[in-house]
Amino acid sequence: MSRASRVLGAAVAALAIGACNNDSPSPTPGVQIALLAVTVTPNPISTIQSSPAGPTWSVNYIVKLTESNGLGGTVELLTGGLYDDANGNLIARNQYDDRDLIVFVGANRVEPNSSLEIRQDLSYIASAKRPTSVVVAVRFRDDRGNLTEPSLIVRAN
């Protein structure tokens, strides 16, 4: 066997071994789509005055994403929008893409039959506290490639 053949054979073997050691999860047999539930704590969300100079108001809450069908996936985008109940205008918005989640939360993945919790903070300037609602929206792609986009509206008092 020539030296070139041995080198080529070793390279092919190394590639095959590397392919066997794939860390990406494999889908659960029989499960076709992940079921992702979105909850927010607290509900309703309390609006607090965070600075008297302005004044600045803020809402702080935890989004919990729970997969319950045995198929994990990746959170591609999580947004939180604060809307004025009187006129429907967007007051503030917070957005995390999959890379932001890794940096700020430590993970962008919801494993099968488990949860991921993400803290969000929204602030706005107004002369007085006003009734608002928070819309939380998620773009989630499961391990079979299915895209789901659950959302939730929560009152902020």
Image (tube, rainbow, N blue to C red):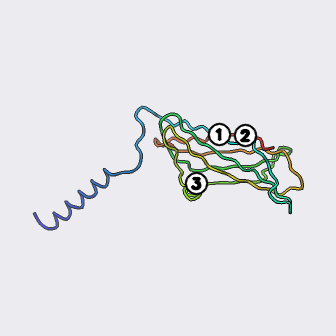
Q: Amino acid at mark 1?
A: Thr
| Residue 138 drawn at (x, y percent) | 62, 45
Residue at the extreme bottom: 3
Circle 2 is placed at which residue position?
A: 43
Task: Compare residues 31 and 155 and report the one nearer the observer.
Answer: 155
Residue at the extreme top: 30
Circle 3 is placed at which residue position?
A: 105
Whether tag 1 and tag 3 are in contact, CB under 8 A, the answer is no
Residue 99 sits in quarter: bottom right
Whole-angstrom CA distance, mark 1 to mark 2, is: 9 Å
Circle 1 is placed at which residue position?
A: 39
Whether tag 2 and tag 3 are in contact, CB under 8 A, the answer is no
Q: Is residue 122 left or right of residue 106?
A: right
User: Which of the image's four quarters has the C terminus?
Assistant: top right
Q: Amino acid at mark 2?
A: Asn
Q: Residues within 10 Å of mark 2 (few under 14, many from 20)?
A: some
Task: Compare residues 51 and 140 and report the one nearer the observer.
Answer: 51
**Counting residues from the N terminus, which is met first, the one under dot 1 or under dot 3?**
1
Dot 2 falls on a residue whose secondary structure is loop
**Counting residues from the N terminus, which is met first, the one under dot 2 or under dot 3?**
2
Dot 1 falls on a residue whose secondary structure is strand
Q: Is residue 32 left or right of residue 18?
A: right
- The answer to whether residue 145 is above or below residue 102 is above
Residue 54 sits in quarter: bottom right
Q: Amino acid at mark 3?
A: Val
User: Residue, x 48% and y 38% (percent of image)?
Assistant: 71
Whole-angstrom CA distance, mark 1 to mark 3, is: 17 Å
User: Residue, x 56% and y 59% (percent of image)?
Assistant: 103
| Residue 98 drawn at (x, y percent) | 56, 54
- The answer to whether residue 115 is above or below residue 13 is above
User: Which of the image's four quarters has the N terminus?
Assistant: bottom left
